Image (cartoon, grey):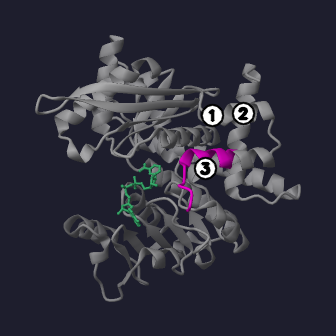
Amino acid sequence: MAEELNSFKIAQAQLDSAAEMMDLDEQAHALLREPMQTVIVNFPVEMHDGTVKTFTGFRVLYNNARGPGKGGIRFHPQENLDTVKALAAWMTWKTALANIPYGGAKGGVICDPKQMNEKELEHLSRAYVRAIAKFIGPQVDIPAPDVYTTPQIMAWIMDEYSKIAGQNEFAVITGKPLEVWGSEGRFDSTAMGGMYVLREAAKLKKIDLKNAKVAIQGFGNAGMFAMDLVTKLFGSKVVAISDSKGGVYSEAGLDYNTLVKVKQSTGSVQNYEGADVQKISNEELLESDVDVLIPAAIENQITAANADKIRAKILLELANGPVTPEADEILANNNVFDLPDFLVNSGGVIVSYFEWVQNLAGYYWPAEDVYKKLDAIITKSFNDVIATQNEYNSKGKRIFPRTAAYIVAVSRVVSAMKVRGWF
Ligand code: NAD
C-alpha cells in the first residue's frame, strides 16, 4: 500500500537533498530539520446556540535566526500539526530567499468555517489569539491570512491582541483591511511578484512575452490576477484557463472581463463561449502548446506521469507545490525552465513585510512605491537563484533552479545561526 504523503517528511527530505548538495554542517542541518517551537492550544468558543465548543489550534515557529516568525493562519477541518510544521519550514526558506528580516512560522485551527456564522468565526478568531498571545507579537511572530482566513479575521486578531497589549498593535499581523493599516497593493501582490519573475525569466531565455501564448491553471486569487496582469503588463495572449470543473482554449486568446463575468454568473470558466473556443480538461491545459504555463491552483499537478508532455518553455509555479520532485528531472531534461514556487509566489509575503514596516513606522506608501520595492526584491531573488545555479553548474554539479533556491535560502539561515553562535 502506498505510504500516505506527509508534508513534513517531504519538507525534511527537500532540506536533506539541499544539505547534501551544499555539504551542510551536520549540527546546522540537525537544527534545521525540526521546528524550534511548537505550540498546541485547546480553547473554548461560545457558539450561536449558547453552547461552548472546544477547538484545537497550532502555532509553529520554525526558525527565528534572521528575525521574527512570519506565516499565515489556516482555518481548516483537516488541519494537522505535520502540515503546519511543513508550511512553517517552507516559510523559513521563502523569507530567507526574499532576504527579508524574518524567520518562518505557521498556524492553524481545526474547524470548518463553512459551517460557522460570522459571530462564531469572530469568537473563534479572538479565542485563538488569546490562547497564543504569548507566542506572537510584532517582534516575535507575525501571522497573516491563508486558507479560509480573510482580512476581516486579521482585523479581529489585531484588535484582540491590542486589547491584551493595552495599546494598538497594528504590526502584530499583516493582510489587514486598509482601514486598519493594511498595505496598498497587497491584494494582487502574489500575482504581481510572479509577473516580475516571468519578465526576468523571459529576458534570460530570450522569449518575447508580447507574442507569447500563456496557459493558466486556476482562476482564483492567484490565477485571476495573473491572467489580468500578464495581458496588461506584457501584452501576452492567454489561450487557456481552467478551474476545478475544467477549462477552455482559444487560439485567438480569451477575454479577461468576459471570463470574470462567466465565472461569477455560472460558477465556472468552462461556460465561456466563442467562435473558436474549445472545452478542455485540466490535463489538456497543462499539456497545451504554449510558451508559458502558470499552475495557479493546487499541488501535485505535474508529475512523472505527465512531465514529458509539458510543452511550455517557461513553467511559472504560482501555486504551492504544483510540481513533484520526480518531475523536476524530466522537465530539466526537456529544457523546460521551471521556476520554483517559493520564488515565484513570494510577492505576498514581501508585501506583508512592507505592511509591517509601514505599521512600525506609522508612514504609508502609495501603491506605485509598493510595486517598485516588490520588483526590486523579487528580481534580486531571481538573480540570486540563477547565479547560484550557474556557480554549481560551473563546478560540474548540475542543479535545478529549485535546488539553487534552497541553497540560497538555507545558506542565509545557516550564516545567521552561525554568527549568533547557535552552533
Ligand atoms: P483560490 O482558492 O482563490 O483559487 C484556486 C483556484 O484553483 C480556483 O479557481 C479553483 O477552481 C481551482 N482549482 C481547485 N482545484 C482544482 C483542480 N483540481 N484543478 C484545477 N483547478 C482547480 O486559491 P489561490 O489563493 O488563488 O491559491 C492558488 C494557489 O496559489 C495555491 O497553491 C496557493 O497556496 C498559492 N498561493 C496563493 C497566494 C495568494 O496570495 N493567493 C500566495 C502564495 C501562494
Above or below residue 314? Residue 164 is: above
Ligand 1 within 8 A of label 2's CB?
Answer: no
- Which residue is farthest left? 49
Above or below residue 168? Residue 61 is: below
Q: Mark 2 points at which residue?
A: 30
Tell me which residue sits at (41%, 25%) in the image: 172
Numbered circle sitting on residue 34: 1
Percent x, y for residue 122? 23, 32
The quadrant of the rendering that contains the N terminus is bottom right
- State the separation of the CA atoms marked 2 and 3: 16 Å
Element carrying mark 1: loop
Tell me which residue sits at (51%, 20%) in the image: 139
* Magenta span of residues: 1-15
Element carrying mark 2: helix
Numbered circle sitting on residue 10: 3
Residue 204 is drawn in which quadrant? bottom right
Percent x, y for residue 62? 57, 32
Residue 117 is drawn in which quadrant? top left
Cβ–Cβ under 8 Å for marks 1 and 3: no
What's under tag 3, amino acid-wise?
Answer: Ile
- State the separation of the CA atoms marked 1 and 3: 13 Å
What's under tag 2, amino acid-wise?
Answer: Ala
Cβ–Cβ under 8 Å for marks 2 and 3: no
Residue 326 is drawn in which quadrant? bottom right
Judged from the image, the quadrant occupied by ligand 1 is bottom left
- Which residue is farthest bottom? 275
Query: Which residue is more in the foreground, 52 or 31?
Result: 52
Mark yes or no: residue 236 visible. Answer: no
Query: Which residue is more in the foreground, 168 or 33?
Result: 33
